[in-house]
Each structure stands twice: as C-alpha cells, then as structure tokens.
Image (spheres, rainbow, N blue to C red):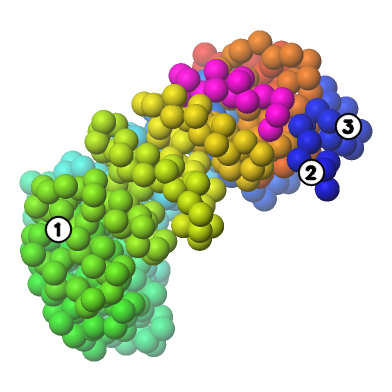
Amino acid sequence: MAACCAPAAAQFYEKVDLRRAPVERLRAALSADNPAIGASVAALAGTGDVRLEPVFRGMARGDAPPVRVFGVLGTALVTKKGIEPALWSALRSDDERATVVRDANITGILRASDPAALLAAAPTTPAATLALVGELHRRGAAWDPARIAPIATGEDPVAAGVAALLLLAGPAGGAADPAPWQRFLERTAAMPAEQRTGVMRAAIEASLLFEIKPAAAELLAACGGADSPDALRVPAVGMALRIDTPRGLDAWRARVREERSQVALVRAGMQLLSAIDRGVPAEDFDAIRNGSTVIDAIADAGKAIASGQDEVTALVALLDAGHSASAEWALVRAAEMPPERSAPVWRHLLGKIDAGNPDERPAATIVSGVVRELAKTDPKSVEALGARVDGDDLLEAALMLGLWESNAAAAPAIARGRRGSLPRMGESLACMILARAAEPLSPEEQSILARAAAGGGDLDPTRAIQAAWLSAAAAGDLDEVTRATGGSAAQESQP
C-alpha cells in the first residue's frame, strides 16, 4: 500500500528502452494503424509546440489517407492559420478533402480558414461544399447559389435540408429563394417519424452553426409546436434563442408555460443562460422559478447577469447549488470574466477544500480548473494550495494538471518546488511542465518523462502522447520523430 504513495523515482516500472520509447509511441500514434490518430494529433497540437509543424506537414504528404487528412488538420492547428488550400488541394480524393472539412467544422478550425479559397482550390463532396458555403454565410460573405442548388434536390435528405435553408436565406446582397425549402418540407412530410426527426434535427444544428437567421421562423413552425417531439422542439427553441432571440423568446415562454416539470424547467433555465449574451430580459428568468434550490440559483444567476448586478455572488451560489451542468456553465462564465472579477469565485472554491463534510469539497476536476485560472493571476495562492493538499494523491495530481493546462509563466517554478514528493501522475505532469518551458531536466526527470511516454506515468492517453513528444524533444530526437512519422526536417519551411 505504501508503494502507491511513494515518489515516482521509487516506484517499480517495467523495463523499457527509455531512449526509444517516446519515438516509438509517436510513430505508432501517428500511423494509419491507429484508429485514434485524430486524438493523437489534437493532443500533440495542444502542447502549443511550433516544432510539430514539420511532423504534420510530412504526414500531409504521407502514403495513407488518415495520415494525410490529420497531417493537414495538424498543420492547421499548430500554425493557427486554418486549413492551407495548397495542402488541402494536394490530398488525393474528394473524400479526403471532405473529411478535413468535416473535422475542421466540428473542431472550430474552419473558422480560422478561408472557405472561399478552399472552394476555389479543389473539388469536394456536397457535404463539404455545404460546410464551406455555410461558413461564408455565417461571416456575411458572398457565395454562389448555383453551387448548392443541385444539392437541395439531391438524394441525401440532410444535405438537401441544409442547402434549402441556405437558399432560403440567400447570400449577402443576393436574393432569397424559398422554393427549395418548401419542396424539402413536402419531402420530409412523407418520411417515417424517426427519419424525419433525424433530418430536421440536422437542419436545426446547421442553422445554429452557420447562423442562418431566416431558418429560425421556419424551423420553429415545423418543429417548435406542442405537437412536436421534445427531440425537435427543445433544440429548435434553443437554436432560435441564439440566432433570432425575440422569436426564440416567444417560443421559450410558450414552452415554459406548458412544461413545468423539474427537468423541463432546468433545461429551460440552461437554454436561457446559454443565450444570456443575446439580450435576454432579466425578468424572463423568473418564469422558471418553482421553489427548487437549483432552479432558483439558475434564475438568480441569469437575472444578475442580465441586469448587470453582482454576478460573482450569483455564480458562487450557482456553483454551490449541486447541479453539475449549471456549475460547469458557471465555471466557464467565470473563466471568461476579467481576472480581477473572477478571482473571488476561484478563492471560494479553494476555500472549500478543507470543508469538514467531504461532500462539500470540490471535485478534483474543479480543483484542476481553479488552479488553471488562478495560476495566471494569483500564483501565490496556488503555491499555498500545494501545502494544503500535500499527501492527497488525487488533489496533488489535480494541482499539477491545472498547472499544465494553464501554461502560466509561474507554472514551472511551482512544479519545480513540488517535484520529488508527488504521486506518479503528479511527477509525470510536473516534468512535462518543466520540459515545455525548456527548463534543463535532470537525468531522473528525463527518465520520468520517457517512462510516462511508455505508459508508466499514470497519465491518460492524451497526456501520455504529449509526454512522448516532450521527452523526445528533451532528448534531442525531434528529427528522428519527424522521419519516423513520414516527414523530413527540411519540410519545415515548405508551404
């Protein structure tokens, strides 16, 4: 039992070739044989290390489709410039280009890209064309209706619905065409209920994603009535609250009057919170009240924010209400506030670590989030927290995870001060923090990183692949990694 709490250097590890382990892990993670290659690319890009660029560019010219696809996406992530038209057009099939666009749309990379340049660079599938045109529409840019008109009558009903909604809205400065949408409604009316629900749900999601404002009225009429299933009515109302708030509020109020169950009211409150930046009137939050602690906390937070009152006190109450979804929303909201405003929220949460009732103490995930934010603005409080959680393996690891995620200037010094007394996961993360900051590593620290790369650091797969990269970098093996994953160091400066 004592061995579980011993420092990393004192624990047993299976014999591995520590020099080769990081490179081999990276080679395997970035190969076509790895079904989670996309997650590996995202994890590596998450280190923020620009030295990954030649690795990803090499993959983009690789022999296997998934390697090429994620090479293009990895390059976009690490350069922060979006999808490069030259790399995208060099892919070997329409399907590969479509996969890049689909994943870029899901992950947000598309918003940093130039959709017009991509449309001009190479052909692709109808779904990818719609995503690129939809992104142009979201930006208020011009696009050619003739490019998507055939899709509105194509075999794929999901693509047809999205195309019809874009044509209904029309391009910036161009004419709207409602006829394709009317034909689409006739088409869906003949579908079995389950199929229609799936197709209309996709139309709702696309309208929200691409902010197709005229779609709100049409989709509320088709899916927002009391006779529609919740699987359509709830997302339709949420979509309308975001892209056509006055119309969405009318639908939201009608639903709140009709549906007064606890689940329905919590969901309604969360929808209104999600649209708080769209000018939601403060008094609307009163409509959900039913005497429940959770619902009253949601209503109080919404009213405080919408009316410009004491937002911090309301967020603290929401965090203490014991409802996970609204607490997560409060954490995100606090993280978006100026540091001097959000600091009381983080200190409140840290103050609960010593609570006598274990149920009142923040979870390890909350501690990580608090450390991530406070490390940027109040590193002394993070140092003090280290002493308070000393000996608690779970919270010590959470502290190091928060420091890693913060990438704060103070993180290496705090990690260095805790090194040597942490549980194995904490030691792995501490060494990752030091390596990312390019601090000199001792032989022991290099060994800890290499073992973490080999799976001996108690890290999740995301952190383990990051440890592999940092270990290879610390050992001076980046050229070998680039060659092992299909590229060459000389490609670093190539477009």
Query: Relative to 298, is 479 above or below?
Result: above
Query: Relative to 209, is 82 above or below?
Result: above
- The span from disc 2 to disc 3 (Cα, nearest Å) is 21 Å
Determine whether, in the image, residue 2 is placed left or right of residue 430.
right
- The span from disc 2 to disc 1 (Cα, nearest Å) is 48 Å
Where are the magenta residues, as a range?
407-422
In this rendered view, identify the residue nearer to me: 330 or 166.
330
Query: Relative to 427, is 319 above or below?
Result: below
Image location of residue 461, percent across then percent down: 66, 44
Q: Do the residues under discs 2 and 3 have CB atoms within 8 angstroms?
A: no
Give the residue number, with chain letter if any, for mark 3.
Answer: 16
Q: Is mark 3 on a helix, strand or loop?
A: loop
Residue 361 forms part of the magenta stretch? no
Camera-side mark, 3 or 1: 1
Q: Do the residues under discs 3 and 1 have CB atoms within 8 angstroms?
A: no
The residue that appears at 19% across and 60% down in the rendered structure is 300
Q: Earlier in the sequence, mark 2 or mark 1?
A: 2
In this rendered view, identify the residue nearer to me: 363 or 123.
363
Q: Which amino acid does label 1 sit on?
A: Lys
Q: Residue 303 carries which label?
A: 1
Determine whether, in the image, residue 165 is placed left or right of residue 494.
left
Image location of residue 317, percent across then percent down: 29, 56
In this rendered view, identify the residue nearer to me: 451 or 293.
293
The residue that appears at 72% across and 25% down in the rendered structure is 420
Q: What residue type is labelled 3?
A: Val
Q: Which of marks 2 and 3 is nearer the N terminus?
A: 2
Give the residue number, with chain letter if any, for mark 2.
Answer: 4
The residue that appears at 23% across and 83% down in the rendered structure is 259
Image location of residue 245, percent across then percent down: 12, 61
- The span from disc 3 to disc 1 (Cα, nearest Å) is 58 Å
